[in-house]
């Protein structure tokens, strides 16, 4: 394994934490960053909250129960 001496300018060091990553990994991150982030609407947030409450109360079907109710067989 090679060892390198790196000098970090004080101006950069004062900006906070620094992270060193391989160039290929950084480029991969930049590609990932292009993916549009999902931002739920107010209605979707309310539906999620309602679903979480139903789950907490035990008001849900397992996948197998759901399939049986729909009449599917394995």
Image (cartoon, rainbow, N blue to C red):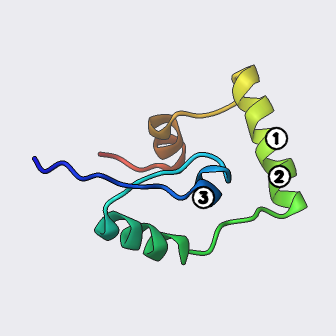
Q: Nearer the viewer, residue 50 or 26?
A: 26
Measured Cα–Cα span from mark 3 to mark 1: 43 Å
Where 9 sits versus 18, above or below? below
Please name whichever residue, 43 or 26, is drawn nearer the observer in this view of the structure: 26
Q: Which mark is residue 45?
A: 2
**Residue visible at 44% across and 67% down in the picture:** 29
Count neighbours of disc 3 (C-alpha within 10 A) and say few if under 14, some if 14 to 19, many if 20 or more. few
Q: Residue at x 47, y 73 (%)?
A: 30
Q: Secondary structure at mark 2?
A: helix
Q: Secondary structure at mark 3?
A: helix
Q: Position of residue 49 (x, y in %)?
A: 82, 41
Contact between labelled residues 2 and 1, with CB atoms less than 8 Å apart: yes
Question: In the depicted view, which residue is nearer to us: 8 or 37?
Answer: 8
Q: Is residue 56 above or below residue 15?
A: above
Q: Residue at x 87, y 49 (%)?
A: 46
Q: Position of residue 41 (x, y in %)?
A: 84, 64
């Amino acid at each position: 394994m090679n060892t390198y001496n790196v000098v970090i300018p004080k101006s950069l060091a004062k900006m906070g934490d620094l992270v060193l990553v391989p160039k290929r990994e950084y480029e991969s991150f930049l590609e990932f960053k292009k993916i549009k982030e999902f931002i739920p609407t107010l209605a979707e947030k309310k539906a999620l909250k309602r679903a979480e409450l139903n789950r907490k109360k035990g008001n849900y079907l397992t996948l197998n129960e759901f399939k049986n109710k729909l009449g599917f067989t394995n």
